[in-house]
């Protein structure tokens, strides 16, 4: 009786373990490192339960002041894939990417860093261009990023192509539905508002929002005298000024207090909350724009 029981136990163990082992053998766990958190949100949704995506930037950090730690370097070296903007914006990643050829997805290959003409804020005989590398602020670009990542994952792990395609379809549908809902809530024909940092042009163009007044060429430097005069002439008191939380305590706060502007935070790097998805973050950004533009239109 004891021998028969043990025999059946061995058979049952074999039946339970073999399918699990076969399933494990047919899949790979992917590790992706991204240069910021919105990109990590896109990557994680595409990976689902078959991998993890982590951001190098921590809350409060920006690509302008970021420095790689030893643990960051090890994380990048051990990753299966790196998603970054490019060497012009993130030069600290260049050597690490070069040392591991073929395992990076560089976004400025698909979108050159956006050159935004700011002539309409200046006199006719003087203009300059501002750059905007925040590609992910447009849901249309986010879908393109997901598709490029999907192509890379299929190349790296063709045995999981069906899973990646399934996840991509779900992600695209979610972003498309969210985009459609937000478009109906972001209809503002004429609003006066300012931006402290040129980080929103992809979002503004996608939703056809009014053009803002750029307050300074750099978040690291106060507006000069000529810029201050221009701001006072073109931005009425009580207007909204959009700023990223990473820069809110500098000159934007001082300027807003002095000139009577309302400071509204825009979470362009997804650092203000633990977002569950790209769509959840995009919805939060849209609500921050509505807070700014709705108040302006009611003045």
Image: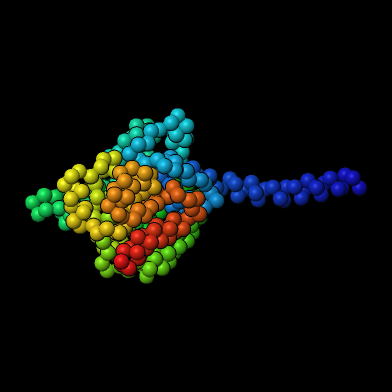
Residue at left offset 60%, top offset 46%: 24
Residue 169 versus residue 117 in the image, above or below = below
Viewer-proximal residue, 109 or 17?
A: 109
Residue at left offset 30%, top offset 66%: 299
Q: Where is residue 181 shown, x and y percent of the image?
A: 41, 68
Q: Where is residue 184 shown, x and y percent of the image?
A: 37, 70
Q: Where is residue 6 shown, x and y percent of the image?
A: 84, 45
Residue 55 versus residue 180 in the image, above or below = above
Asked whether residue 53 is in view, the answer is yes
Asked whether residue 286 is in view, the answer is no
Residue at left offset 62%, top offset 48%: 22
- Spot the residue most to the right: 1
Residue at left offset 24%, top offset 52%: 214
Viewer-proximal residue, 236 or 88?
A: 236
- Spot the residue most to the top: 70
Residue 90 is drawn in which quadrant? Answer: top left
- Spot the residue most to the left: 125
Viewer-proximal residue, 102 or 96?
A: 96
Viewer-proximal residue, 133 or 197?
A: 197
Q: Where is residue 203 shown, x and y percent of the image?
A: 32, 58
Q: Is residue 21 left or right of residue 270?
A: right
């Amino acid at each position: 009786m004891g021998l028969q029981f043990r025999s059946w136990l061995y058979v049952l163990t074999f039946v339970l373990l073999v399918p699990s082992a076969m399933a494990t053998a047919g899949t790979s766990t992917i590790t992706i490192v991204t240069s910021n958190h919105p990109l990590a949100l896109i990557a994680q949704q595409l990976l689902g339960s078959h991998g993890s995506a982590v951001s190098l930037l921590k809350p409060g950090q920006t690509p302008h002041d970021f420095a790689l730690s030893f643990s960051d370097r090890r994380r990048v070296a051990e990753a299966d894939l790196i998603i970054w903007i490019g060497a012009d914006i993130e030069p600290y990643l260049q050597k690490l990417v070069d040392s591991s050829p073929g395992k990076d997805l560089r976004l400025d290959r698909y979108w050159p860093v956006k050159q935004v003409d700011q002539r309409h804020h200046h006199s006719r005989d003087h203009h300059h261009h501002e750059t905007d590398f925040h590609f992910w602020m447009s849901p249309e670009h986010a879908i393109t990023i997901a598709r490029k990542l999907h192509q890379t994952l299929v190349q790296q792990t063709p045995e999981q192509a069906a899973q990646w395609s399934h996840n991509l379809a779900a992600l695209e549908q979610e972003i498309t539905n969210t985009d459609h809902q937000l478009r109906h809530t972001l209809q503002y024909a004429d609003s006066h508002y300012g931006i402290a940092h040129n980080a929103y042009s992809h979002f503004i163009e996608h939703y056809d929002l009014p053009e803002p007044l750029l307050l300074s060429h750099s978040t690291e430097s106060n507006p000069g005298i000529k810029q201050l005069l221009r701001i006072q002439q073109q931005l009425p008191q009580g207007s909204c000024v959009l700023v990223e939380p990473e820069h809110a305590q500098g000159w934007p706060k001082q300027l807003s207090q002095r000139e009577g502007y309302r400071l509204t935070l825009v979470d362009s790097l997804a650092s203000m909350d633990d977002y569950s998805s790209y769509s959840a973050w995009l919805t939060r950004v849209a609500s921050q724009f509505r807070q700014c533009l709705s108040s302006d239109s009611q003045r």
